[in-house]
Amino acid sequence: MQTTQRHFSEYLEGTKQSLAEPLAAIQSEAAALKQVPAISQDTGMLADVERISQAAAEMTASLEVLLELEPGDETQLARLRHNLRNGVGVVDGYADILLEDSEDESALSRLRTLRQQSRLLQERLDMLAVAPQKKADDDPIAAIFRSFKSGLKADKRESISATILVVDDNESSRELLAHQLQRQDHTVIEAADGKRCLEVMRSAAPDLVLLDLVMPDMNGYEVLQAIRGDEELRRIPVVVISGVQDEEGAIHCIDAGASDYLIKPVNATLLKARLGALLEAKQWQDRERQYLAELEKSQRFIRKVFGRYLSNEIVQRLLDDSDGLKLGGQRREVTILMADIRDFSTISRDLEPERCVQLLNNYLAIMTEVIQRYRGTVDEFVGDGILAIFGAPVSEDDDCDRALACAVAMQLAMGEVNRRNAEQGLPQIAIGIGLNTGDVVAGNIGSERRSKYGVVGHNVNLAARVESCTVGGQVLASPATIAGAKVELLTGQAVEVMIKGEAVPMPLSEVLGVGLPYDLVLPSPVTEWQSLVSPRSVQLAVLTDKRLADQRIEAQVIAVRGRDIQVLGAESLQVPSDVCIYGLTGDDALYAKLLSIKEGGLYLSVTSWDSRAEAALSALQ
């Protein structure tokens, strides 16, 4: 037994000397390389030589473990071979880098000698076993190591540039991987332990992680579990690199979330191929996430933009409908609401542009809120005008009722608009609203580059003409809208008007209130008609398509109520006529609209209402 132990000790001593000889030669060549001017004057290459020298020194020190081995001590031997192979990998890796970078013949000669000694060290390392007769060809790690060496210079194909986090407690292994990855145009971040790995992943968000399995504090498997439990980190691919070939451990790592499992020393060609495949897959996943994010962003934009004009319910139905944004249209029966500020041309002329926009914003903000409350679609704003649709893009049974209720609610909301205007020193305004119901073509109008949802057709034009017959504070509805209403209506006296495009006069109904479930009523005039003691002579001129007629018609004002006036004469006028009244405010004229003709005369409402008009009519009473 003592003889066997003595022979085993002699074998270990010989093995140690066998491995120490090429290691000493490597250290000698490294020391000589430091003296070569081309190396000593280049800080980068000098640092690489220092790493070779340090790796050789660490391997020499680790050889002392050999003398402590016992026959059959495979575990300790495997750990020693793992450490030595890490060191040889560092030596060969940096030697190959220097061979590629250096052009000095003296340096190249010594590097070739160093690589010969490294190959000799590997050959002897491949034969290292507890039993001296073990063949190197039977060692799978040695075979991988040989392919790793030859693969360092292989595969010059372009790869995806990425940010890669290298996690290893062995500084030399980290630095070698960093050098190899940087030469492939990757950006490399390093971490020496598992905790630091998680910190860097959260702060730097690398594209891929190379993770050592055996580390202090947190091992690689524990790091994988932490990554898998983090919603953001789990998207980053992780390649586990282990110095021990363990099939069961590899399975556990894959189950824990690893994208791949490689054995040290890693074949450079295999590593590059695996990284390329994983980075390409991640690139596609990132593009998919980016597409989904852009889609969500687009939908948020649609909600933000269309949400100003449509109710949330309608916006969602448009988003859910795959055909919702296609060009084209379909015939729909809708109720169209048109609203316009009376005498806005005069108001905008007298206001600075910024103040005019402020006034419009006060008005449009409140009106849009009212329209959305009644589930209408704001088709467009045209200056001070609003076009709203009830029945498109979503049709409901009570479209007509909601449109009528919305019109009355808009008139009631003008009190809030004027309150805001008063606070900001802006003039008071009044609106007229016209309603019409009928078939239109509704859909996306325009081109692929620019389009809008809207309605077109005769009934849209008819709604605009109904609105043109209104005065401030008034709601007029066409016969079709009145007929289509299911809700109880409070209406004023119908007015027959000749409307462009119609062969016969059309009776328009003034809507004063809408019954349950809306229960909305416009306030009655606060004043009674005041008859003038002495009639006031005036002249009237008809306004047609914004053009004032040359002929002036003589008339007499006989009664006043607020902004309304009753006149005699001018029987040739027709309802609804826009007229200009001369003789009430000196040389200036007032604009008015003829509302009705009765036996008592003509009834007009002043549309250019301001302090000047108010003072002129008050003086008559």
Image (tube, helix red, strand yellow):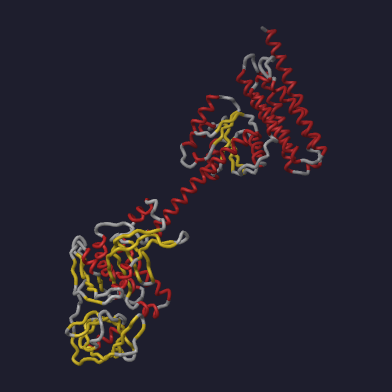
Number of disc labels: 0
**Residue 492 x, y percent position in the rendering:** 19, 73
Instruction: Relative to 451, say whether 476 is above or below.
Output: below
Dividing the picture into quadrants, the one containing residue 594 is bottom left
Left or right: 76 with respect to 587? right
* Quarter of the N terminus within the rendering: top right
Nearer-the-camera pick, 212 or 255: 255
Dividing the picture into quadrants, the one containing residue 116 is top right
Residue that protrudes farthest toward the left in the picture: 599
Dividing the picture into quadrants, the one containing residue 542 is bottom left
Residue that protrudes farthest toward the right in the picture: 106
**Residue 66 x, y percent position in the rendering:** 68, 20
Residue drawn at the location 18% of the way across and 87% of the way down: 531
**Residue 83 x, y percent position in the rendering:** 65, 27
**Residue 324 x, y percent position in the rendering:** 38, 54
Left or right: 310 with respect to 98? left
Residue that protrudes farthest toward the front in the picture: 503
Is residue 192 at least partly visible in the picture?
Answer: no
Is residue 429 at least partly visible in the picture?
Answer: yes
* Quarter of the C terminus within the rendering: bottom left
Instruction: Relative to 88, say whether 135 is above or below.
Output: above
Left or right: 118 with respect to 411? right
Nearer-the-camera pick, 359 or 85: 359
Nearer-the-camera pick, 68 or 496: 496
Residue drawn at the location 75% of the way across and 21% of the way down: 18
Residue drawn at the location 62% of the way across and 17% of the way down: 73
Nearer-the-camera pick, 121 or 346: 346
